[in-house]
């Protein structure tokens, strides 16, 4: 089947019409988040003095980056039709593993970093296998993982270090060698953190995978309709497990970025933020039911969060407003997403109806509909 | 109609079934069913619910193995280990659920699982222009003019969706196309659209097996009609051997229907 398709690689010399630009823009999942981000950017630029200064920009970008990396991975997972509630504590777990190994076991920092990566990927694999093998909703399975990790983080850290935090990491062997990768910042201009670069690279990479690779096609299909995907030969199991492992990888990355930035790790790190990642993804246009969304959308959702979080601080308001704002934002996003998607779909359907001069019947070869659209006949190649 | 032309070169039978029987335990789901599927011809399989239509297509598409009789593919006994073997040999089945993802664009659905790529290693990427152009060209070849291949499949009507699934099977190298009740859930107009694409597939030299319970859908496109009832063949008719009225009567249960209408008249 696949070989038959490959033999006919010759590109048909044909004009493929595109929908109007407005329709194409509206079809993008992240269009709502983009508009909201622009409004919030302008709002805080006007309301506060610090927001637009280079130092201010560096601050909210760093905030957005740490949430953004996870939000992008969570978006991919949601497009693939699954949830992960263990994302937040994964950030804590990986930081703690690296910290404990480096400070209490005398392990070289690079080795500790790699060990925590392996553990994170193993947890992602376990999440994926449990969800796929049992057929249970990922919400329940990862809720279990979430509590296990939360408990282990506190219990093991206390048992090994006698405290609930890792201290003295900067004295560990090799710390300063590894710091450039995860905890450095620009020396000229405002101190732009390296995490912002990681965020941009990770978002670009995920966007490329989603839109321009076979795996990306598979991710949309397993979230949109797993049964159909299986029927046409998409490896559903591998795709979903890969997504859980990508999310775990992102958790590890954020864990390392926080650890090297602050040189300390709290045993309670990450508890409660898993919902913020999901909110960022939904605000970014991901459907809760899967099959629709984008990585850029997740990144924009996190940008909205970062700008609001720091904007409220700059404005000197009570930062409890943030939670209320997030909730309102989530509800607005869900409604806007629904509206935008309906509009895009009906607009597309109308365009088709207008341009659907069905041909004159099976035997009337000369009455090809292609002729009046100016397109080449398929047979002509 | 090209298929009815007298003196046209002999149609080669791609699939030939001779006295096929299939048992589920002691229950005979099929008994002594014979037909031919030839290139450039439409073989209609007609029957009421429970007549054995789906068992028959499962045998043809390699899902089940027949217990008796002969199944020839290109003149040699067919030995399909499963649906994948049948698919590799060029027997494609378009099921009622169509195996499409509603939220994905038409062109992504068209190539799902068989995406075209270019480049190597980490740079291996989707060949988007080729896939969009091929989708458009293949749909036009089937006479389907959907201007916008980027629109989600979910926005298409039932008939259009069915047609895209047929075009996809044809492009992926099918020689025999098995269509499982493609018009069952459609209105009159949409069903007409699908019938046109069936005729188009036949003109392109494919053997088509068209499963239906509606003689009005079967008669306009069929070259051969196989009637099934409770797992047995009520007969196989060529296009010239049977009229639409006879076909309808046979399908409706013949004399049974006469009795029924008589009975209802009195009540």
Image: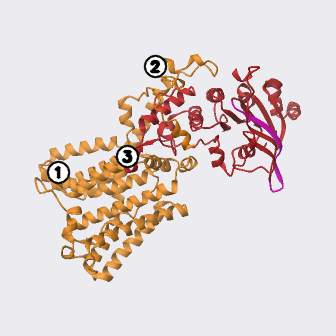
Name the image quarter holding the N terminus of chain B: top right
Identify the residue position indicated by label 2 in the image. A374
The disc numbered 2 marks a residue on which chain? Answer: A
Q: Which residues are magenta?
A: B24-39
Identify the residue position indicated by label 1 in the image. A57
Secondary element under disc 3, as helix, strand or loop, is loop
Q: Residue shown at 57%/28% (left/top)?
A: B142
Tell me which label, 3 or 1, sits earlier in the chain: 1
Q: Quadrant of residue A99?
A: bottom left
* Residue B173, position as x, y percentages in the image: 59, 38
Label 3 – label 2 distance at C-alpha: 37 Å
Q: Is residue A92 above or below residue B133?
A: below
The disc numbered 3 marks a residue on which chain? Answer: A
Q: Main secondary structure of the magenta part?
A: strand
Front label number (2 vs 1): 2
Chain letter, colour orange in render: A
Secondary element under disc 1, as helix, strand or loop, is helix
- Out of B167 and B176, give the one closest to the viewer: B176
What colour scheme governs how the chains and residues are painted in the rendered image of this protein? by chain
Identify the residue position indicated by label 3 in the image. A285
Query: Along the horizontal axis of the image, is B161 left or right of B249?
Result: left
Tell me which label, 2 or 1, sits earlier in the chain: 1
Neighbourhood count class around disc 2 (C-alpha, 10 Å): few under 14, some 14–19, many 20 upward: few
Query: Mark 3 near mark 2, Cβ–Cβ under 8 Å?
Result: no
Q: Residue shown at 15%/44% (left/top)?
A: A46
Residue B193 shows which numbered tag?
none
Front label number (3 vs 2): 2
């Amino acid at each position: 089947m696949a070989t038959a398709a490959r033999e006919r690689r010759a590109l048909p010399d044909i004009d493929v019409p595109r929908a109007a630009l407005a329709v194409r823009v509206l079809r993008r999942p992240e269009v709502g988040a983009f508009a909201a981000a622009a409004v919030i950017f302008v709002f805080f630029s006007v309301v506060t003095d610090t927001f637009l200064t280079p130092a201010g920009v560096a601050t909210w970008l760093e905030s957005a980056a740490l949430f953004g990396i996870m939000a992008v991975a969570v978006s991919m997972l949601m497009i693939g039709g699954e949830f992960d509630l263990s994302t937040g504590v994964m950030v804590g777990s990986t930081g703690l593993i690296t910290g404990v190994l480096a400070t209490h076991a005398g392990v070289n920092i690079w080795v500790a970093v790699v060990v925590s990566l392996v553990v994170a990927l193993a947890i992602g694999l376990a999440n994926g296998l449990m969800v796929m093998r049992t057929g249970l909703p990922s919400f329940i399975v990862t809720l279990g993982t979430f509590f296990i990790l939360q408990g282990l983080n506190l219990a093991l850290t206390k048992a090994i270090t006698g405290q609930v935090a890792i201290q003295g990491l900067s004295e560990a062997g090799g710390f300063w060698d590894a710091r450039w990768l995860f905890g450095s910042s620009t020396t000229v201009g405002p101190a732009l953190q390296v995490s912002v670069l990681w965020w941009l690279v990770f978002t670009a990479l995920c966007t490329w995978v989603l839109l321009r690779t076979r795996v990306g096609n598979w991710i949309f299909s397993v979230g949109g309709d797993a049964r159909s995907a299986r029927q046409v030969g998409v490896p559903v199991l591998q795709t979903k497990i890969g997504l859980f492992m990508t999310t775990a990888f992102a958790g590890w990355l954020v864990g390392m970025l926080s650890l090297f930035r602050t040189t300390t790790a709290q045993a309670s790190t990450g508890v409660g933020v898993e919902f913020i990642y999901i909110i960022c993804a939904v605000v970014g246009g991901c459907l809760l039911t899967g099959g629709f969304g984008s990585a850029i959308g997740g990144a924009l959702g996190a940008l909205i969060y970062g700008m609001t979080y720091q904007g409220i601080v700059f404005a000197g308001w009570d930062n409890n407003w943030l939670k209320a704002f997030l909730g309102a934002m989530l509800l607005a996003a869900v409604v806007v997403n629904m509206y935008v998607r309906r509009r895009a779909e009906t607009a597309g359907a109308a365009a088709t109806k207008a341009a659907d001069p069905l041909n004159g019947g099976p035997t009337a070869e000369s009455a090809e509909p292609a002729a009046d659209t100016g397109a080449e006949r398929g047979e002509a190649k | 109609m090209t298929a009815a032309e007298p003196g046209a070169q002999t149609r080669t039978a791609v699939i030939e079934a001779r006295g096929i029987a299939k048992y589920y335990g002691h229950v005979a789901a099929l008994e002594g069913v014979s037909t031919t599927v030839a290139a450039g011809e439409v073989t209609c399989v007609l029957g009421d619910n429970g007549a054995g239509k789906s068992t028959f297509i499962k045998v043809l598409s390699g899902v089940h193995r027949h217990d008796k009789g002969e199944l020839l593919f290109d003149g040699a006994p067919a030995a399909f280990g499963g649906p994948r073997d049948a698919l590799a040999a060029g027997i494609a089945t378009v099921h009622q659920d169509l195996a499409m993802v509603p939220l994905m664009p038409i062109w992504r659905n068209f190539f799902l699982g068989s995406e075209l790529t270019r480049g190597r290693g980490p740079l291996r990427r989707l060949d988007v222009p080729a896939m969009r152009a091929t989708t458009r060209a293949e749909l036009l070849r089937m006479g389907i003019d959907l201007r916008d291949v980027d629109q989600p499949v979910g926005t298409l009507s039932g008939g259009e969706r069915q047609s895209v699934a047929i075009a996809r099977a044809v492009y992926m190298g099918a020689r025999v196309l098995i269509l499982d009740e493609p018009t069952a859930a459609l209105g009159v107009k949409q069903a007409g659209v699908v019938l046109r694409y069936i005729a188009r597939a036949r003109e392109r030299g494919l053997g088509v097996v068209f499963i239906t319970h509606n003689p009005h859908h079967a008669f306009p496109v069929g070259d051969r009609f196989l009637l099934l009832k409770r797992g047995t063949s009520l007969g196989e008719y060529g296009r010239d051997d049977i009229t639409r009225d006879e076909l309808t009567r046979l399908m409706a249960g013949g004399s049974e229907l006469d009795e029924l209408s008589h009975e209802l008249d009195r009540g």
